[in-house]
Amino acid sequence: MARIVLSGFEPYGGFEENPSAEVVMKMHGRIIGGAKVDSVILPVSFRRSFNVLQATIEDGEEPCIIISTGLMPFASAIQVERVAINIKDYDGVPDNEGSKPQDEPILQDGPPAYFSTLPVRKIVQRLIEAGIPAMISNTAGTHLCNFIMYNVLHYVTKRGWKTKVGFIHFPFLPKQLQKLTHRPPTTASLPLDIMVRAIEVSILTATELE
């Protein structure tokens, strides 16, 4: 059976929850579009995160889709990322091991950037049609989310795989938003079941366009 690999992150930056971890574990073991989902929660660590994800990717046949996910604090909608850049910069928030890289390349010999190979615009369109707020994002930041997206795209490219790869950012869960004392007026939250539905729609959109 075909495989889909999903990843989310553990909590970080003082937040007690990370919706990406909760979403991907809700998807673990499910059959979507004729493929079985393997989910993994990654440490918020520049040193270890990609090694953990790589082990999951390699624990079976070549995946048809790899979607990594993370939390984008204060986002107003689900963000489907278009590009990952070859830079890591902690941007004021150390990883969970205290690492603070600044202005460093992810890979010394890597290209400046990789574009998502998911049908980004079509996914956003389908999410909006399903009543889920979504947008294309042209920056995944410079922290662990960008780091993972870049590394996975590089890994798949070097192996010549046809795997579709991309990254999706989630806004806060409602329980997280309730704990915030100060937030921009555009800050949004989405229930967990809506985020899970968003991943389902994203996977189905990617598989139907093969």
Image (cartoon, grey):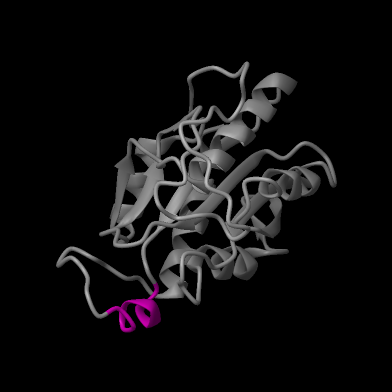
Asked whether residue 204 is in view, the answer is no
Decide if residue 15 is on the left or right side of residue 78: right
Q: Is residue 88 above or below residue 96?
A: above
**Quarter of the picture holding the C terminus:** top right
- In the figure, residue 36 lies in which quadrant? bottom right
Which range is magenta?
173-180
At x 55%, y 39%, the residue is 147
Q: Position of residue 28 (x, y in %)?
A: 68, 64
Q: Residue at the spot x=56%, y=70% of the render? A: 22
- Nearest the eye: 102 or 45: 102
Q: Residue farthest to the left?
A: 185
Query: In which image quadrant can residue 178 be found?
Result: bottom left
Visible residue check, residue 181: yes
Residue 6: x and y in percent read 63, 53
Nearest the viewer among 11 and 100 is 100
Residue 97's x, y, as percent?
63, 58
Q: Is residue 178 magenta?
A: yes
State the residue lying farthest toward the right: 60
User: Does residue 31 sit above or below 67 in this rendering?
Assistant: below
Number of disc labels: 0
Magenta-drawn stretch contains 55? no
